[in-house]
Amino acid sequence: MTSASLPPAHASLPPRVVVTGAHGQLGRALLRLSPDAHGFGRDELDITDADAVRGIVNPGDVLVNCAAYTAVDQAEREVDAAFAVNATGPAVLAAACAAAGARLIHVSTDYVFPGNASKPYEPEDPTGPATVYGRSKLAGEQAVLECAPDAHIVRTAWVYTGRGGDFVATMRRLERERDTVNVVNDQIGSPTYAVDLAAGLLELAGKPGAPRILHATNAGQASWFDLARAVFTGIGADPERVRPCGTDEFPRPAPRPAYSVLSGKSWAAAGLTPLRSWEPALNDALAAVTD
Ligand SMILES: NC(=O)c1ccc[n+]([C@@H]2O[C@H](COP(=O)([O-])OP(=O)(O)OC[C@H]3O[C@@H](n4cnc5c(N)ncnc54)[C@H](OP(=O)(O)O)[C@@H]3O)[C@@H](O)[C@H]2O)c1
C-alpha cells in the first residue's frame, strides 16, 4: 500500500468525544459518564462563534451538542437570543463538523411537535412547534440536516437530574416546604433521567450508521402529577400530598404540550439499547442526590 492510499490516521482510532454546553445538566451527565471526553462550557466555547468552533473540531471527532437556550417562557420575548443559540449555533457546529470530517450529534426536543397527539411521536411525524423555543430548535434541526450529512438529531423530553432547579429537584424542595403541592395532570410526556440519556448518546457516538433523526427518552409516559407523586413516594413522603390540577391554573407565556410522548421505536430499530422505564430511572436519580 502506498502512502497515498493509506486511510486517514484518525480512521482506526476510537472517536474523540467533544461536548458543547458542558456545564448544563445533560453536558455534566455526559462528562461524568465519559471523563475522557473534552467538555466546553459556554465560557470556554460560544457555539455561535464560528472561528472558535472551527478551532476545537478535529477530524474523526464526535461532537455532542448540549448547548441550548432552554428558558422556554423567556424565549417568547427573547426571540433573537433563542434563535442565535438554538438555530445559528447548531448551523455553525454542523458546518465546522462537515468541513473537518467530524460527526455531530445534536440534541433537540419534543417541542418541535405541536404537542396535541394521541399516540407517541415518531421521528418522521410532521413537526409544528407552538412556541418560540420549539421554532428555534426546529430551525436548528433543519440547519444541521442541511449542513452536515453525517449528523444525527436526537430529540428528547422532560430531562432532569434531580439537582439544581429542575422539576424533580423542585418537587423535593416543595415536599420540605409545603403540606400539599398542586401539580398539573393534563400534560403527558416522557420523564428522562439525564444520565440514561447521556449513556444513550455515548452509545450512538459509536454507531455512525444510525438514522439521522432519533428519539431518546426513558420508556413509558406520565403526567407532571404522576411524576411528582413518584418523587414523593421515592423520598418516603406521602404521595397523597400531591394534588392534581389543570394547566389553566398555571398560565405560562409559552403554551405547554398536552401530549408529547416520543416513541422509542426508531432508537431500538437502529440497534441502540432502549432506555429503561422512567420509574426505575427516577428512583436511581433520587438515590444519587444527597442534599
Ligand atoms: N431540560 C429539558 O427538559 C429538555 C427537554 C427536551 C430537550 N432538551 C434539550 O436537551 C439539550 C440539553 O439541555 P439541558 O437540559 O442540559 O439544558 P441546560 O441545563 O439549560 O444546559 C444548556 C447549556 O447550554 C449553555 N449555552 C447557552 N448558550 C450557549 C452558547 N451560545 N454557547 C455555548 N453554550 C451555551 C448554557 O449555559 P448558560 O447556563 O451559561 O446559559 C447551559 O450550560 C438541549 O438541546 C435542550 O434543548 C432539554
Image (tube, rainbow, N blue to C red):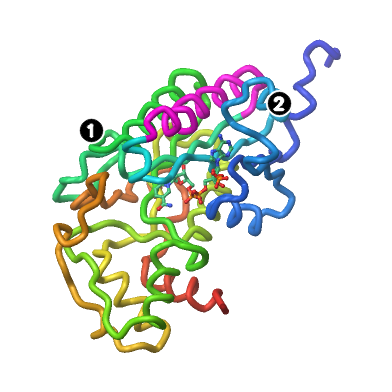
- Classify mark 1: helix, strand or loop: loop
Q: Is residue 215 magenta?
A: no
Callout 1 amino acid? Gly
- Tell me which label, 1 or 2, sits earlier in the chain: 2
Check the picture and name the quadrant holding the N terminus: top right
Of residue 205 and residue 140, the one placed in the foreground of this image is 140
Q: Position of residue 284 (x, y in %)?
A: 49, 74
Give the distance between the C-alpha atoms of the residues marked 1 and 2, in whole angstroms.
35 Å
Dominant secondary structure (helix, strand or loop) of the stretch shown in magenta: helix
Q: In the drawing, what numbered circle is on residue 128?
A: 1
- In the rendered view, would you say 231 is above or below 74? below
Q: Is residue 49 left or right of residue 112?
A: right
Of residue 54 and residue 4, the one placed in the foreground of this image is 54
- In the rendered view, would you say 149 is above or below 61? above
Q: Which residue is mark 2?
A: 59
Q: In the drawing, what numbered circle is on residue 101?
A: none
Q: Is residue 204 left or right of residue 139?
A: right
Callout 2 amino acid? Pro
Magenta stretch, residue numbers:
78-102
Q: Is residue 101 magenta?
A: yes
- In the rendered view, would you say 269 is above or below 132? below
